[in-house]
Image (cartoon, rainbow, N blue to C red):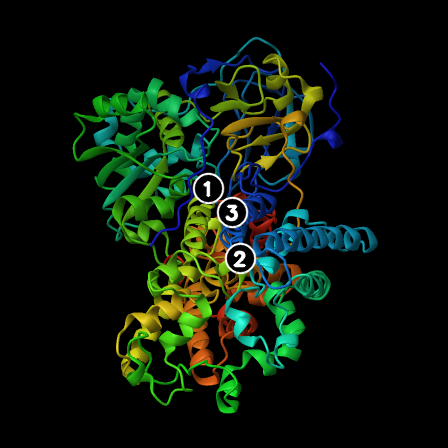
């Protein structure tokens, strides 16, 4: 029995807009930590000259992903800047653009013909060195996720093209415009996972992407494009496995233990760029949507301040109430517009002051809507009440740790309780 | 372009969008649904004028204004006086409508009391009825709605609790029918025995001296052309205002559930009605009723259990939050209601049962059958 809530999408304008290359920033603010896993430290110092794609921060630990310079120029300072990945200021390398567009030596890469004879560990090394992390928002280093233990047989690779966030269209444009790149990216991942069945999962509502994907993947072995009717919640990896493969991953088990890997399309696109072009992850496609003159999709350098993007797109900053990055349901409201784009910034959504609806919180009326809406069958209001009382032990007993942070409980709450937020507090 | 300073941005935790349903909207939908029921009741009852000269339809209209007006005014005043109380105009208005709809005003059913010492004890006719309506509204708003909300959460349905409290002095004289049976003052048969249609007097012999059918005939002013069925379903002139037309309540309730989608606890209504039907059929077999429909119709449609099922048993604050709990609540309410009516001879059984079930909600809320994802 699945609890699913339909959340209306605001994609119509943005999804029809081709990806536009956004100019490089004058000053890039590159956060040294945007990944899950070990902490990076800068490998450059103030005054150093850096080139496009040069590694500027890294960690020695295995579970990590390095950071590269998105532009060529000079390191002018290293100090904290607001990091939307962690909702707090963290260390950042400020690089002043010299506008010479000097490129660093590309990463070791291979041709498509060489793929069959390339060792998995070499492919994983390229992915790691390119700094690739889960671009769907999770931010976990991809080289670790795809290094599945040899004794685990992977049956299915689900390529996640659901893009459930109601304002985001970046993945959709990647599926439309970079289909061929996705095909070769999927080949890399399939090889790494020992040739599982590949299911490209997308929504039937992505009417432009579906035929492109079907055509591009038609000649691939053991590959299927599944244009399903999925709700927002089913964009989550565990939810998607249930929707497509029909099982519920037991709590505490990792996806690969069930023989399935779910990989987001934007990440696959980055993998293809790294493996075949030697390009590290220094830019990404992000959706600009919400109360903006023209919703669109931008290929933007990591480290570009959000303010630059808004100003260049004629967004009137004085009328803004809030700016959310990474999706309106799971993303973060920026504390400052100086915040830079990170690897995880899948979208920038603006909300204008005059369009903000009243979100005043009143007392719980015990309607139980959050309970019937929770896709993982938790009782959000019960956990919320436990957290408000400070009883974290009770919150734990109510399985607060199983929350997937989808935000549906808060979305449906008729009195606007911060249910999702408090369940997240219980998790921490 | 302005230079935006960081503290001007609104920084709320995710999610950053919300669904369109709000508490006020839920209350507005409920208000419209119950108002429709009230209007139908007033229209039906406007055909009757009591000996005091008050038209029943007019009585309903005036009573509605009193209950809703008082409730909204009290809510506003308490909101002004106390800082930790929210002003909930729509919620108060809905409360007022529930008070009027669960007020027992029926006529000519209560005419059986005329000429007996009980007449004075029953708030049946205007203008006396208005005082009772006002009293129930005030006590319900102040004690069971506002004070309870400030103290924590509402434990019992405010309208039911207030009515119960106000009518306690009359409960044992007019409403506990088994008492009348023993004293032989009223022609009310016990439900704890075989009941049947008016023609089957023999089958109910020894049951308070009257057949159940005869009782119904007396209560509802049945004429030869009206069947018990049509009285029960279409229109009747007894008991709660909200129970005047069962079909009106069902239509308004179903439309409310359809419009409000998953925000209303329809599972309680559904499980209650199904359990009422099942329990009354079981009792029919146990007591050897001559036909199965009389007890069934009585359980489902007599009095006001139908109004209670749709608009009182689904009160969000005093009912379980999860689906399983709502079904347990509905079934428990049904079994309790029929048991009270049958074994205590108390026709206000659904109200008492509701209060008891309300108090059990914290316990029911702890029951869960549906384990989380992957557990």
Mark 3 closeness class: few <14, some 14–19, many ≥20 residues within 10 Å = some
Residue A381 falls in which quadrant of the image? bottom right
Mark 1 closeness class: few <14, some 14–19, many ≥20 residues within 10 Å = many
Q: Give the CA distance from mark 1 to mark 2.
A: 75 Å
- The quarter of the rendered structure image containing the N terminus of chain B is top right
Report the side of A3 relative to A69 (left or right): left
Q: Give the CA distance from mark 3 to mark 2.
A: 20 Å
Per the image, label 3 sits on a secondary structure element best described as helix
Residue pointed to by mark 2: B48
Please say if the residues under marks 3 and 1 sit with CB atoms less than 8 Å apart.
no
Residue B66 at x, y percent in the picture: 69, 54
Mark 2 closeness class: few <14, some 14–19, many ≥20 residues within 10 Å = some
Report the side of A194 relative to B75 (left or right): left
Q: Which mark is residue B36?
A: 3
What is the chain letter for disc 3? B
Residue B372 falls in which quadrant of the image? bottom left
Between A5 and A117, the one nearer to me in the picture: A5
Report the side of B331 relative to B351 (left or right): left
**Residue at image coords 31%, 49%:** A242
């Amino acid at each position: 029995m699945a609890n699913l809530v339909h959340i209306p999408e605001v994609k119509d304008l943005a999804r029809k807009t081709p990806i536009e290359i956004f100019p490089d920033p004058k000053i890039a603010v590159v956060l040294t930590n945007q990944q899950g896993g070990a902490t990076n430290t800068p490998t450059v110092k103030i005054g150093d000259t850096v080139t496009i794609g040069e590694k500027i921060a890294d960690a020695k630990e295995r579970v990590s992903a390095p950071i590269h310079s998105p532009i060529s120029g000079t390191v002018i300072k290293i100090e904290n800047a607001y990091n939307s990945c962690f909702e707090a200021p963290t260390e950042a390398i400020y690089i002043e653009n010299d506008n010479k567009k000097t490129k660093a030596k590309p990463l070791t890469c291979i041709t498509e013909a060489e793929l069959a004879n390339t060792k998995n560990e070499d492919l994983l090394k390229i992915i790691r060195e390119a700094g690739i992390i889960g671009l769907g928002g999770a931010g976990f280093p991809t080289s670790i996720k795809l290094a599945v233990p040899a004794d685990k047989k992977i049956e299915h690779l689900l390529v996640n093209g659901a893009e459930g966030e109601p304002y985001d269209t970046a993945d959709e444009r990647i599926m439309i415009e970079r289909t061929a790149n996705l095909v070769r990216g999927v080949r890399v991942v399939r090889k790494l996972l020992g040739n599982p069945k590949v299911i490209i999962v997308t929504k039937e509502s992505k009417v432009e992407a579906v035929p492109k994907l079907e055509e591009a993947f038609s000649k691939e072995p053991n590959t299927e494009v599944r244009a399903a009717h999925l709700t927002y919640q089913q964009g989550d990896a565990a939810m998607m496995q249930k929707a497509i493969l029909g099982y519920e991953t037991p709590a505490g088990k990792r996806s690969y233990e069930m023989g399935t890997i779910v990989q987001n399309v934007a990440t696959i696109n980055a993998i293809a760029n790294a493996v075949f072009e030697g390009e590290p992850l220094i830019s990404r496609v992000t959706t600009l949507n919400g109360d903006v003159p023209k919703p669109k999709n931008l290929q933007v350098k990591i480290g570009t301040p959000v303010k630059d993007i808004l100003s260049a797109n004629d967004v009137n900053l004085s009328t803004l109430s809030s700016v959310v990055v990474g999706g309106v349901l799971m993303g973060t409201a920026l504390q400052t517009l100086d915040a830079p784009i990170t690897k995880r910034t899948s979208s920038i959504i603006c909300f204008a002051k005059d369009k903000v609806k009243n979100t005043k919180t009143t007392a719980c009326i015990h309607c139980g809507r959050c309970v019937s809406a929770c896709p993982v069958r938790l009782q959000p209001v019960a956990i919320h009440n436990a957290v408000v009382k400070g009883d974290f032990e009770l919150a734990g007993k109510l399985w607060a740790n199983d929350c997937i942070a989808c935000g549906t409980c808060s979305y449906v709450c008729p009195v606007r309780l911060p249910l999702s937020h408090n369940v997240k507090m219980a998790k921490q | 372009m302005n230079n935006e300073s960081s503290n001007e941005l609104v920084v709320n935790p995710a999610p950053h969008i919300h669904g369109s349903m709000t508490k006020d909207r839920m209350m507005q939908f409920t208000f419209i649904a119950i108002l429709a029921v009230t209007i139908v009741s007033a229209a039906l009852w406007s055909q009757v004028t009591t000996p005091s000269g008050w038209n029943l339809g007019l009585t309903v209209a005036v009573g509605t204004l009193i209950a809703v007006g008082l409730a909204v005014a009290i809510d506003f005043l308490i909101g002004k006086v106390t800082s930790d109380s929210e002003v909930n105009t729509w919620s108060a208005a809905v409360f007022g409508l529930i008070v009027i709809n669960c007020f027992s005003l029926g006529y000519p059913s209560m005419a059986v009391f005329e000429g007996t010492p009980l007449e004075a004890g029953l708030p049946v006719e205007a203008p006396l009825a208005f005082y009772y309506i006002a009293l129930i509204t005030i006590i319900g708003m102040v004690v069971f709605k506002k004070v309870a909300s400030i103290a924590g959460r509402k434990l019992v349905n405010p309208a039911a609790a207030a009515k119960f409290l106000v009518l306690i002095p009359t409960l044992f004289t007019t409403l506990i029918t088994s008492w009348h049976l023993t004293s032989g003052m009223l022609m009310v048969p016990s439900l704890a025995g075989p009941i049947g249609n008016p023609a089957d007097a023999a089958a109910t012999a020894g049951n308070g001296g009257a057949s159940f059918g005869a009782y119904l005939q007396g209560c509802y002013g049945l004429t030869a052309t009206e069947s018990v069925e049509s009285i029960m379903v279409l229109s009747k002139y007894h008991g709660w205002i909200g129970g005047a037309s069962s079909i009106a309540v069902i239509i308004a309730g179903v439309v409310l559930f359809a419009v409000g989608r998953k925000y209303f606890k329809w599972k309680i209504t559904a499980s209650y009605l199904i359990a009422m039907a099942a329990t009354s059929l079981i009792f029919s077999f146990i007591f050897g009723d001559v036909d199965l429909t009389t007890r069934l119709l009585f359980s489902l449609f007599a009095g006001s259990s139908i109004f209670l099922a749709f608009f009182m048993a689904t009160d969000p604050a005093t009912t379980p939050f999860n689906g399983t709990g709502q079904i347990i609540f509905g079934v428990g309410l049904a079994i309790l209601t029929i048991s009270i009516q049958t074994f205590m001879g108390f026709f206000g059984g659904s109200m008492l049962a509701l209060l008891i079930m309300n108090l059990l909600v914290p316990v029911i809320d702890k029951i869960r059958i549906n384990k989380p994802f992957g557990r």
